[in-house]
Amino acid sequence: MLNPSKFIQESIQKIKKEIGDEKAVIALSGGVDSSVCSVLVKKAIGNNLTAVFVNHGLLREGEVEEVRAIFEDRLNFVYVDASDEFLHALKGVNDPEKKRKIIGKVFIDVFEREAEKIQAKFLVQGTIAPDWIESEGKIKSHHNLALPGGMVLEVLEPIRELYKDEVREIGLELNLPKELIYRQPFPGPGLAVRVIGTLTKEKLAICRKADEIVREEVELGSFQNELWQYFAVLTDTLVTGIKGDERDFGYLVVLRFVASLDAMTANVPELPWELIRTISDRITTEVSDVTHVSLSLSDKPPSTIEFA
């Protein structure tokens, strides 16, 4: 069984020994993994760690403001708005795997520019056990990463043997805000994998608003502790509807609610029908481009949690 206090003390000593007086950089997403990792490493090496928060334009409503409010005073924090750069690279791309690869490449380009500014030697990653288990990775904790511009960083993964529930225990021990520790996981590619088909600012805005409604209603009813993730997916399916007294032709949004312990498996729990109906009514009323809302009922496996 994990002893959070012991893990933190042992990790701090190990990180101090490995990084020494060198500089390190971490990509801070605002999720619990990178957040815990950032604060843990900060305790070991202080301001020799720079936390870079890259806004790729694919974040949820209010996420930029929330992350900045929590971390600007806690860490040596750098905010980079690269949303136009990402959206330009993603223009016209339909395939979700291509989206992921493009996002990964642009992110590395942006991140490398920031790492070069501080002449970092180490790259800290918030990798946890499900990340490398699912990808069948056999990468050791310490390996070198050659970035596109030729910069070579030594990779450090302080929490790679932990599962999400254990990471949250560490976060509580580090006195991180509970709303951050228990926030639902959010994929690295962000809304790019929740907008099916090509991306536009308009479609991202639709998905962002629908997702905000889902989160508001789930949290208003205090169902968030029963769920691992809860979100809206904007499909590329158009459905006939009625707005006012006129025919409308708008998007289909799918609601996704799953319960899980560590994301290795997940199930769709029974939720009050009133909650589902309220979310559906609000989305079709408040998001003008949506005419139809449906509910995903597939567990993992055979499905994955995300749609794309």
Image (cartoon, rainbow, N blue to C red):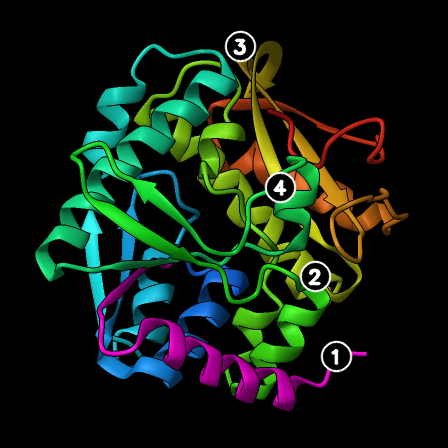
Quick check: 138 left or right of 55? right
Q: Circle 1 sits in a helix, a strand or a loop, which is it?
A: loop
Quick check: 230 left or right of 110? right
Q: Position of residue 87 (x, y in %)?
A: 27, 27
Q: Circle 4 sits in a helix, a strand or a loop, which is it?
A: loop
Q: Position of residue 242 (x, y in %)?
A: 60, 16
Are dots 2 and 4 in contact, CB under 8 Å? no
The type of residue carrying mark 3 is Phe
Q: Which residue is mark 3?
A: 249
The type of residue carrying mark 4 is Lys
Q: Residue at x 62, y 39 (%)?
A: 137
Earlier residue among tags 3 and 1 = 1
Q: Circle 2 sits in a helix, a strand or a loop, which is it?
A: loop
Q: Which residue is mark 2?
A: 163
Q: Which residue is mark 4?
A: 138
Q: Residues within 10 Å of mark 4 (few under 14, many from 20)?
A: few
Gap in angstroms between the C-alphas marked 4 and 1: 23 Å
Marks 4, 1: nearer the viewer: 4
Earlier residue among tags 3 and 2 = 2
Q: Residues within 10 Å of mark 1 (few under 14, many from 20)?
A: few
Front-most of residues 176 and 107: 107
Whether 18 is drawn above or below 128: the answer is: below
Q: Position of residue 227 (x, y in %)?
A: 76, 56
Q: Residues within 10 Å of mark 2 (few under 14, many from 20)?
A: some
Gap in angstroms between the C-alphas marked 3 and 1: 53 Å
The type of residue carrying mark 2 is Tyr
Quick check: 180 left or right of 91? right
The range drawn in magenta is 1-29
